[in-house]
Amino acid sequence: MTWSLGLAIYFVIWWVVLFAVLPWGVSSQHESGEIAPGTEPGAPAVHLVWKKLFWTTIAASVVFGVCYGLYCYDLVPIDWLTAISNPPHR
């Protein structure tokens, strides 16, 4: 795997994990009881964006490490992946 391919795969994994991490620990303004004028009551009271970006990077690194290990040590053979991804021809 080249560096550019690894970086591209990590980038995609990072964005997918970001969307999984975004809802963690969110409480709405309605739940906290402090609704800012002109905002939706369901909007987050505290965003914690930097904390979520940190945990996204940690989780994406773990997922990428597992995928990289599976690829490098040939634990999931490429032939098997191509066999299961191609539907049978009729």
Image (cartoon, grey):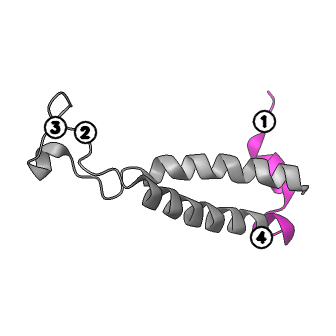
What's under tag 2, amino acid-wise? Ala
Alpha carbon distance from label 2 to label 4: 40 Å
Precedes in sequence: disc 3 or disc 1: 3
User: The magenta stretch spans which residues?
Assistant: 69-90
Q: Which residue is mark 3?
A: 36
> Is residue 82 visible to us here?
yes
Which percent across, then down, holds residue 50? Answer: 46, 57
**Could you classify mark 3 by the number of other residues whose Cα lies within 10 Å: few (under 14), some (14-19), or many (20 or more)?**
few
Which percent across, then down, holds residue 78? Answer: 86, 55
Q: Which mark is residue 88?
A: 1
Precedes in sequence: disc 2 or disc 4: 2
**Could you classify mark 2 by the number of other residues whose Cα lies within 10 Å: few (under 14), some (14-19), or many (20 or more)?**
some
Whether pointer 3 and pointer 2 mark residues with C-beta atoms closer than 8 Å, the reply is yes
Q: Which mark is residue 43?
A: 2
Whether pointer 1 and pointer 2 mark residues with C-beta atoms closer than 8 Å, the reply is no
Q: Which residue is mark 4?
A: 69
Alpha carbon distance from label 3 to label 1: 57 Å
**Could you classify mark 1 by the number of other residues whose Cα lies within 10 Å: few (under 14), some (14-19), or many (20 or more)?**
few
Instruction: Left or right? Give the position of 84 relative to 78.
Output: left
Alpha carbon distance from label 4 to label 1: 29 Å
